Every structure is written in structure tokens, then in C-alpha cells.
């Protein structure tokens, strides 16, 4: 198809691709190339760059212009797009095969202004990091004024945009300015490190020293360990699992700490903010703390001269309006001298500065990009300043690392992210390593690890570092022989007891009535916790605590710790050791307080329907002074309430009845328990009501939202089979979809506990979560009820498969397994072979994008040979090569059931094609054979064509991306239309 028709036919797609993410970078890079290739005259370019014009109208203008200019102009546009677009965007478009004009073909020297145009894409790249030096050269030559320099360096521009503004301005100044610039660039290219080897002013170096020593001191200890032994971060820090979030299109590789700021997973080159997201207690703050510590020691991120670290919990307490300068110097680190020089240096060298913001979800109002602050000296409310820094309106080019819980990562924020990294807690090896670090004594560590091995539910909980910390902290209680914890409530009750024991005056063990003895402390801290949650308040002044009646003795229990670095050092401030502990105390308060009525419990379970803060009124009452609850996007607040609700369920479980009766009469507990059960049941019903009627021919399917997973976890905490059964009594679906729901091992335990009570069998789709081998093991109890299980992209290895298949063989209903994109190797194919031999009603096995080779295929073939039911076999993206393809084809030749086989991208050549031709010849059932992206030549295709002549059932053989010339492709299509390219 001609280029003009390609552009006209894909106008909408090109428009979208050039406007993607609202960034002008794509369009401007394309225009750079078109200017360089001479397609755009200078006037055309200026017409398309009118300030204030919307990006989409600029793109439309460009598309109109190239269409008017005709076929070859369209060809160049497509060629430019194919150079600029990343692979995923290119793949979604048809960009033809137009070649750009030969570069460097001009005869003889050309005027400098013209050279700037024809070398523009290169010059933009080389100027990006040396704008200041180029401007200095132009100032010195008198071609530029200071006004010109300021215009180029507007903070709103990205470095590439600044480079373009510079080139445009030089063009408009004429030949002399262009000559100076070219000379300057040639000189700096001759000594490439020259502009980079900038000397830092002495004041900056001194300030850096102060910043480093203050960060070093701040990051030495972990706050959870405050006052409990002297473990430093160095002694206890354990690597947690970091992964690039989905959407970058890259394979999921574990990341190291410094990779957070590296290139891997970048979605938007022009954005500056990297977001690390993870659930409560999974280690976000600790990870940042480690990053700061490494920078302060000179062990990481040394490209950054300054690192400013902010804790959003503390920032959100700042009610004054502040400027960027205040934020750096007053809130972070005060420079002893040369404030102006340092601040100017920061403004001039944004790429030398790194900001970290811990817990952006802790701002009462969610991220918003409505109000703009672009001037570094303008005062604004702190959240506004922070949001402008994150989105790059303020201090463009300065890198930021922010952490947040996933709920607060809204689409509005995502737009401005350079990339998103997921923090997934400890791996199994991480748990082992943490526990050994925590317990200096190896024999205690071994005992704790043994206790965990024998209690898989607890072991799963330990993947979340904060739980791992509690379990380690309470090793005495854990090994003491009592009932081993199963739920999060169990382990928080354990830590409650542990802390009371620690501060008990007598060394003797607490008596069995310890709750009764300590109920006063529990209620006072509970009231503080609850009031704080409802107003997103996590830091409390001494005076506030006094108003709640909190005593010195209460504080000594250790649940509250001093807040580090609070802005008003004259008065002490406190916070709970971890926010989950605050949630737990709030839950204790709700359960034990006689005055709490049904509306409170209701507002806990229906947060979206809450009226003006019923809980706040109950709990804060007259004490409510600072920060009354505000309306707004309070997603993180909702998450804390959800955690609290989960604890409420756990506390109301029959298992803890005896303990709580010490502090609360039975009728009160009964009443609350009934209310909670009703709320859970109603919550579930709300979900079921949202299930759409199935379209004809499709299965009745429910896509669960994260709230569904939370309700399931609440039910699990209650540990009451009757509640689980009742909750699912009215769920009638054939397919339950729980994709992208942050399901890890802990959630798997809860899901299996509840879903095993489903009345009819379901397809359980858990794709794109973090189930892993431990999670697979937890899911086994509900495998009986599954007719299909999909676990695509879940970090599962051969060990997980061993356990899965062991159970699957015994499950009558199970007919389909999907394991695309995990970590499976040949070591697991013997299990699948066994499954195929033993289950003669099994229908579908999909193992694409794993690490299977010919050896694995041969083992699988053993099972296929004796199976009479398999219809779908997917092995896309493995490496079975010819030997594997031959083994599979031969094993499937007598299959009476095979309908669909995919061997896409498996390194298969003509020998494999020849064996597959035999399969085509003999099969009476095969309909689709996928052989895309292999290395079959025309000879191999001939075998397939001949076999097709003898087969009437096959509908398609997919062969795109093999080794055929365009003429051969054309000829083959003519021979048999079932061959698809
Ligand atoms: N990498 C780690 N190494 C050792 N201990 C860790 C690590 N990560 C977390 N912990 C332990 O877990 C506790 C909670 O972690 P942290 O506060 O970093 O979680 P978070 O994700 O920031 O939680 P939240 O979202 O609730 O603020 C830490 O105080 C520490 O005791």
C-alpha cells in the first residue's frame, strides 16, 4: 500500500501514537527528523510550533501538511515515526518500508544555519546535557542576551525541549550565532567530558557533606526497632523483591536497589518520577532508607550531588505555605553558608539532584494536577508543591523517587511517571535471611524457621516484612508451645502480649487475664489510633496524647515511638511503631468499646458510603483539634480502614472470644459479631449483583475487584466455616477472574479457605499476580472446586508445579491449566506427563513463555502419547527446537482430540516442519497450528503444503515470521489459503 494511503488510513492511530501520554517529545522528535531530511521548510516548522497550541492540533497540522505534500512526504513521515516510536507502538501500526534520505550526502560545506537544521536530531541529543555551557558560549560571543538564556531555560521545559528552543533561537539570530554554536559543539564533542567535568562550588560541597552526615544519622536505625536492642539497618536490612510494573512490555526481571533509577522499565523518557508501590508493611520506607544510607556513604547513586529526602507523613502536618527553597532548606537540611549559591546551583543543575518522597498516599488529598506552581520561589501549600514536583511543572529534569501504597496510584498520577516499580516483600530466601539476621543465635533462628516450615499460613504472612518482623520479635511466644498463629490478627495479638510482657514490672510471665489488666492502656491507645485514622493523622503531639488521657505508662509500653525529624523539636511527637499497629489498636477500640454502635461498624465496611465521619465523631469528640477530616480522594485512608476492618473480624472470631471476654461482655461481642457477619455478607452480595448476564455462548463470569479480595481476607480472619459458606451461598459463576489484584501467598490462603465452599465448579483466573510457589501450595484446598486454573505470570517455578500437579491429579473437575510466563524448566515436564497419563478428561495445557527445551518436550511427549482427551496445547515462546517438535508431533499423531497446537517462536526448522506435516496428515481433529516466528524455509513449508492437501479438518497454519522471501510467501498463499502469513 502507498505511503499516502497508509497515513490517511491510520490517521486516528497516528494521532494517538504521537499524542501518547500527553508528551510532546514524540511529535518534536519526528519534526526534528523531518526538518533534517528537508521535508519541513523552516516556515512549516514554525507554523506547527505556535506557542499555546494543543498537542493534538499540532499533530493534525503535521498530518494535513504531509498529505498535501504527497506520497514521498508521507513516506518520510512514516520513516520518521518508525525511528522515533518504541517497538510496541511500531508493532501496532503499519509504517511501510520507506527509507529516509542518505545522511551526509551533501556536497561541499553548507551554511551554519542550514547545518543546524540538517543535524538537528543529533544536536538535540548532544545539547541536552550541556545547555548551560552552550548558553555561556553564546552569551560570551554577544549573540545571546540573558533574556534569551532565561527563555531557553524555562523550568517548564524538558532538557530536550530546552535544546530545541536553543536551536530555534539560534536559527532566528542568523549565521553568526549558528557558527558560534556549531564551533562550541565541535569543541565539546572533541573533549566530551568537558561540560560534564564541572567544578562544584565550595559551598555546594560543604552542603553535600552536611546533607550526607544528616542522612547517615537518620538512616542508621529502623524505627520499628527503636528502643529494642541495637540492630542497625546494616545488621538487619534484607533485600526485598523489586519488579518493574506491568505495562513496560519488558520481561519481568528482579531489580536491584540502584535499578530503581536505571533505565529498565522506563515508560516515559520525559518524565522524572519513579514510583515504588507496595502494600502496607512490605518495606517501602525501609527500602528508601537503605537507598539514602548508601548515597550518604558514597556507595550508590553518586551521579547525584544532592539527595533530599522527605517523609510525606511529616510534610502533610505542615500547614503553612512554603516555597521550594523553604522545603529544601528548612524542612530538609539548612545550609550553613552560601544559601543563594547553593539554591542557584540546584536550579541550574536539576539532573544533579534527587528527591525522595516516602508515602505519598499519606497526604489527605489525593494527587491532583489542577493547580500549577512553576516558580521555585513561589509559596504554595505543601501538597501542591509536592504534586508539581512529581509531575515536573516545577524543577523539570530533577529525578524523584516516590513510594506509595498501590491504591493511591491513580491514573492522574500514572500520567507523570517515568516508571513504576513494585515492591513485593521478602522472597522465601529473604525470610530465611531476615530471621537469621534478627536472631544472632543460630539455634534460635533455626527453631523459628522450623516453626514457620510447619505452619504454611504463618510462613506466607512472613513474606510481608512487617509481619516477619513481628514473628521474629515474638519468637519467645511463637516457640512457647501455645497455638501457632494463622491469621494477621493472631500475630498482632501475639505482639500485643509480647509488648505488655516486655514492660511488665515482674519478670514472670503475664497471667492469663492480661487483657483485663491492660484494658485501660488498650482503650486509650485505641482511641488515639482510631481518631488518627479517620483524619489521616499518624503523628501525635504530647499535648494531644494528654487530651486523650494517654499516660506516661501507656507510652512506655513501646507501641508508640518518638517521631524522627519532626519540624518542631521543642515538643515531642509520637507515632505508632507501624501504621498497621495503629490499625490494630483502632480495631481493639471498636471491638471493646461498649459505646460503639452499628453505624461505626457499617462505616468501616462501606467506606464509600460513609457519612461525614461517624467514627471521627465517636472517637475524637472534643479532642479533635488539629486536622479535622477533609473530603477528597482518600484512598489510602480507605486502605487503613480496610486493614482495621480485617482486624475487627479477626478479633470477633470465636478463637479469641475467651481472651476478649476479659474486657468486654459477651452480649456486646455477640452483637458486633452479628453486625460484622451481616456486613460481610452484604458486601459479597454487592459484588455478585454486579455480575453481568452472560452473552450468549459465553460463560457467566465475574471479574472481582480488590474489594472482593479484602472481604475474602476478612472472612478468613474470622476462621468460621459457616461464615465462609454463607458468604458464597449465592455466588453462581462459571468463571472467577482475579487478575491484577495484588494476590500474593497471604491472599491465596484466604481465597482457598473461602472458595473451597463454592457450590459449583469454577474457572479460577489469577493471572498477573504474585502467587509464587508458596501461594500455589496455599491454593491447593480449593483446587477441587476448579474446572480450570490460570496462573499466568505469577513467578511459579518447578517446585510449585510439583505440588500443583500432585493435587491436580486427584481433582475430578480440573480440566484446564494455564501457566504462561512463569519460571518453568524441563524439570517440571515429567509432572505434566504424569497428569496427562492419569487424567483422561483433561482438555487444555498452556505452558507458553517458559524455559522448556527439547528435553522437556520429549518428556511431555511421553504423557501426550497416552492421553486421549487433550484439545489445546500451548508452548509458545519456549525453545523446543526441531528435536522437541519431532517428539511432540509424533506423540500427538494418534491423538483423537487435539484441536489447537501452538509452537510459535520455538526455534523450529525444516526437520520439525516435516514431523508436523506428518501430524497434519494423520490428524482428524486438528484445526489450528501456530508456527509463527520459527526458522522454517520454503522447503519446510512444502512438507506442510503437501500434508494439507490430504487434510480437510485443518483451518489454519500460521507461518508469519519464518524464512521465506516475499515472493515465496505470495506463492505459498496461492497454493493453499489455509496457510496464513
Ligand atoms: N528490607 C527490609 N529488611 C529488613 N526489615 C524490613 C525490610 N523491609 C521492611 N522491614 C521491616 O518491616 C517494617 C515495615 O516496613 P516499612 O515501614 O518499610 O513498610 P512500608 O511498606 O513503608 O509500610 P506502609 O505502607 O504501611 O508505610 C520495618 O520497620 C522493618 O522492621
Image (tube, rainbow, N blue to C red):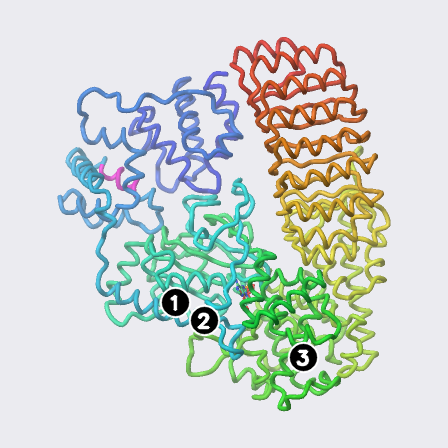
| Relative image position of residue 791 (x, y in whole percent) | 68, 44
Of badges 2 and 3, nearer the viewer stands: 3
Q: State how many labels appear.
A: 3
Residue range corresponding to the magenta coloring:
163-170
Of the image marks 2 and 3, the number of the one nearer the N terminus: 2
Give the side of residue 532 with respect to residue 480, left or right: left
| Relative image position of residue 426 (x, y in whole percent) | 58, 59
| Relative image position of residue 466 (x, y in whole percent) | 59, 66
What residue is rendered at 70% in x and 24% in y?
889
Kindly give the residue lying farthest to the bottom in the view shown: 506
- Asked which quadrant contains residue 203, the reply is bottom left
Kindly give the residue lying farthest to the left in the view shown: 141
Cβ–Cβ under 8 Å for marks 2 and 1: yes
Structural distance between the alpha carbons of marks 1 and 3? 44 Å
What residue is rendered at 65% in x and 35% in y?
856
> Does the magenta portion include 245?
no
- Secondary structure under badge 3? helix
- Asked which quadrant contains residue 492, the reply is bottom right
Determine which residue is flagged by label 2. Answer: 318
Amino acid at each position: 500500500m502507498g505511503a499516502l494511503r497508509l497515513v490517511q488510513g491510520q490517521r486516528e492511530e497516528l494521532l494517538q501514537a504521537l499524542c501518547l501520554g500527553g508528551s510532546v517529545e514524540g511529535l518534536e522528535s519526528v519534526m526534528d527528523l523531518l526538518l533534517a531530511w528537508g521535508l519541513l521548510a523552516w516556515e512549516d516548522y514554525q507554523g506547527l510550533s505556535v506557542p499555546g497550541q494543543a498537542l493534538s492540533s499540532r499533530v493534525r497540522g503535521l498530518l494535513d501538511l504531509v498529505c498535501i505534500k504527497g506520497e514521498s512526504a508521507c513516506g518520510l513521515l512514516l520513516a520518521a515515526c518508525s525511528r522515533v516510536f518504541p517497538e510496541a507502538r511500531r508493532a501496532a501500526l503499519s509504517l511501510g518500508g520507506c527509507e529516509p534520505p542518505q545522511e551526509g550526502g551533501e556536497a561541499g560545506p553548507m551554511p551554519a544555519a542550514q547545518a543546524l537544521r540538517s543535524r538537528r536530531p543529533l544536536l538535540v541529543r548532544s545539547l541536552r546535557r550541556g545547555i548551560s555551557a552552550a548558553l555561556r558560549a553564546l552569551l560570551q560571543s554577544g549573540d545571546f542576551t540573558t533574556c534569551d538564556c532565561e527563555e531557553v531555560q524555562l523550568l517548564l521545559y524538558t532538557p530536550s525541549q530546552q535544546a530545541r528552543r536553543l536551536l530555534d533561537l539560534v536559527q532566528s539570530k542568523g549565521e553568526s550565532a549558528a557558527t558560534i554554536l556549531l564551533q562550541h559543539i565541535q569543541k565539546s564533542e572533541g573533549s566530551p567530558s568537558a561540560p560534564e567535568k564541572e567544578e562544584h562550588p565550595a559551598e555546594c560541597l560543604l552542603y553535600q557533606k552536611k546533607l550526607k552526615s544528616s542522612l547517615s544519622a537518620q538512616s542508621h536505625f529502623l524505627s520499628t526497632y527503636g528502643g529494642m536492642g541495637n540492630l542497625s539497618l546494616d545488621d538487619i536490612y534484607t533485600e526485598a523483591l523489586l519488579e518493574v510494573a506491568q505495562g513496560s512490555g519488558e520481561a519481568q526481571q528482579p531489580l536491584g536497589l540502584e535499578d530503581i533509577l536505571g533505565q529498565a522499565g522506563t515508560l516515559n523518557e520525559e518524565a522524572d518520577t519513579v514510583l515504588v508501590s507496595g502494600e502496607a508493611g512490605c518495606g517501602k520506607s525501609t527500602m528508601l532508607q537503605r537507598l539514602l544510607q548508601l548515597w550518604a556513604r558514597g556507595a550508590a547513586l553518586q551521579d547525584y550531588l544532592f539527595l533530599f529526602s522527605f517523609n510525606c507523613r511529616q510534610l502533610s502536618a505542615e500547614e503553612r505555605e512554603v516555597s521550594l527553597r523553604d522545603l529544601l532548606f528548612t524542612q530538609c537540611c539548612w545550609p550553613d553558608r552560601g544559601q543563594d549559591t547553593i539554591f542557584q546551583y540546584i536550579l541550574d543543575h536539576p539532573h544533579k539532584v534527587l528527591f525522595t518522597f516516602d508515602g505519598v498516599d499519606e497526604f489527605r488529598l489525593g494527587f491532583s494536577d489542577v493547580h500549577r506552581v512553576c516558580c521555585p520561589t513561589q509559596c504554595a501549600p505543601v501538597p501542591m508543591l509536592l504534586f508539581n514536583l512529581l509531575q515536573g511543572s516545577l524543577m523539570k529534569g530533577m529525578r524523584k523517587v516516590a513510594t506509595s501504597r498501590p491504591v493511591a496510584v491513580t491514573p492522574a498520577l500514572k500520567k507523570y511517571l517515568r516508571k513504576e516499580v513494585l515492591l513485593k516483600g521478602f522472597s522465601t530466601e529473604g525470610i530465611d535471611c531476615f530471621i537469621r539476621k534478627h536472631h544472632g543465635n543460630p539455634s534460635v533462628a533455626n527453631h523459628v524457621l522450623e516453626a514457620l516450615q510447619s505452619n504454611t499460613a504463618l510462613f506466607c504472612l512472613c513474606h510481608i516484612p512487617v509481619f516477619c518482623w513481628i514473628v521474629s520479635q515474638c519468637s519467645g511466644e511463637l516457640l512457647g508451645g501455645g497455638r501457632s498463629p494463622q491469621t494477621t490478627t493472631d500475630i498482632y495479638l501475639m505482639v500485643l502480649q509480647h509488648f505488655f510482657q516486655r514492660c511488665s514490672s515482674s519478670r514472670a510471665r503475664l497471667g492469663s487475664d492480661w487483657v483485663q489488666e491492660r484494658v485501660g492502656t488498650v482503650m486509650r491507645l485505641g482511641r488515639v489510633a482510631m481518631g488518627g485514622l479517620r483524619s489521616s493523622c499518624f503523628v501525635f503531639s504530647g499535648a494531644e496524647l494528654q487530651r486523650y488521657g494517654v499516660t506516661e505508662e501507656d507510652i512506655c509500653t513501646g507501641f508508640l515511638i518518638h517521631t524522627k525529624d519532626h519540624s518542631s523539636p521543642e515538643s515531642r511527637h509520637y507515632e505508632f511503631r507501624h501504621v498497621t499497629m495503629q490499625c490494630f489498636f483502632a480495631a481493639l477500640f471498636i471491638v471493646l468499646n461498649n459505646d460503639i454502635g452499628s453505624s461505626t461498624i457499617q462505616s468501616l465496611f462501606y467506606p464509600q458510603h460513609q457519612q461525614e465521619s461517624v467514627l471521627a465523631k465517636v472517637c475524637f469528640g472534643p479532642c479533635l483539634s488539629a486536622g479535622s477530616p477533609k473530603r477528597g480522594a482518600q484512598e489510602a485512608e480507605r486502605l487503613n480502614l480496610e486493614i482495621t476492618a480485617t482486624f475487627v473480624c479477626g478479633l470477633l472470631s470465636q478463637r479469641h472470644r475467651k481472651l476478649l471476654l476479659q474486657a468486654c461482655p459477651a452480649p456486646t461481642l455477640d452483637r458486633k459479631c452479628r453486625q460484622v457477619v451481616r456486613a460481610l455478607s452484604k458486601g459479597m452480595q454487592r459484588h455478585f449483583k454486579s455480575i453481568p448476564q452472560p452473552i450468549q455462548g459465553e460463560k457467566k463470569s465475574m471479574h472481582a475487584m480488590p474489594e472482593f479480595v479484602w472481604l475474602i481476607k476478612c472472612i478468613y480472619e474470622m476462621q468460621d466455616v459457616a461464615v465462609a459458606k454463607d458468604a458464597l451461598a449465592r455466588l453462581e459463576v462459571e468463571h472467577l477472574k482475579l487478575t491484577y489484584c495484588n494476590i500474593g501467598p497471604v491472599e491465596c490462603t484466604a481465597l482457598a479457605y473461602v472458595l473451597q465452599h463454592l457450590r459449583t465448579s469454577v474457572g479460577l483466573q489469577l493471572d498477573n499476580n504474585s502467587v509464587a510457589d508458596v501461594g500455589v501450595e496455599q491454593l491447593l484446598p480449593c483446587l477441587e472446586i476448579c474446572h480450570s486454573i490460570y496462573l499466568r505470570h505469577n513467578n511459579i517455578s518447578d517446585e510449585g508445579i510439583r505440588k500443583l500437579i500432585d493435587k491436580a491429579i486427584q481433582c475430578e473437575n480440573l480440566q484446564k491449566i494455564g501457566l504462561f510466563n512463569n519460571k518453568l524448566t524441563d524439570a517440571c515436564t515429567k509432572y505434566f506427563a504424569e497428569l496427562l497419563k492419569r487424567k483422561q478428561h483433561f482438555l487444555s495445557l498452556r505452558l507458553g513463555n517458559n524455559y522448556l527445551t527439547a528435553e522437556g518436550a520429549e518428556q511431555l511427549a511421553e504423557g501426550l502419547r497416552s492421553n486421549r482427551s487433550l484439545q489445546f496445547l500451548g508452548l509458545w515462546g519456549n525453545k523446543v527446537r526441531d528435536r522437541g517438535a519431532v517428539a511432540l508431533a509424533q506423540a500427538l499423531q494418534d491423538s483423537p482430540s487435539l484441536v489447537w497446537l501452538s509452537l510459535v517462536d520455538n526455534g523450529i526448522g525444516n526437520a520439525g516442519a516435516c514431523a508436523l506435516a506428518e501430524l497434519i496428515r494423520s490428524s482428524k481433529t486438528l484445526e489450528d497450528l501456530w508456527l509463527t516466528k520459527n526458522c522454517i524455509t520454503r522447503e519446510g513449508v512444502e512438507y506442510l503444503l503437501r500434508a494439507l492437501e490430504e487434510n480437510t479438518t485443518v483451518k489454519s497454519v500460521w507461518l508469519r515470521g519464518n524464512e521465506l522471501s516475499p515472493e515465496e510467501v505470495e506463492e505459498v498463499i496461492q497454493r493453499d489459503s489455509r496457510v496464513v502469513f
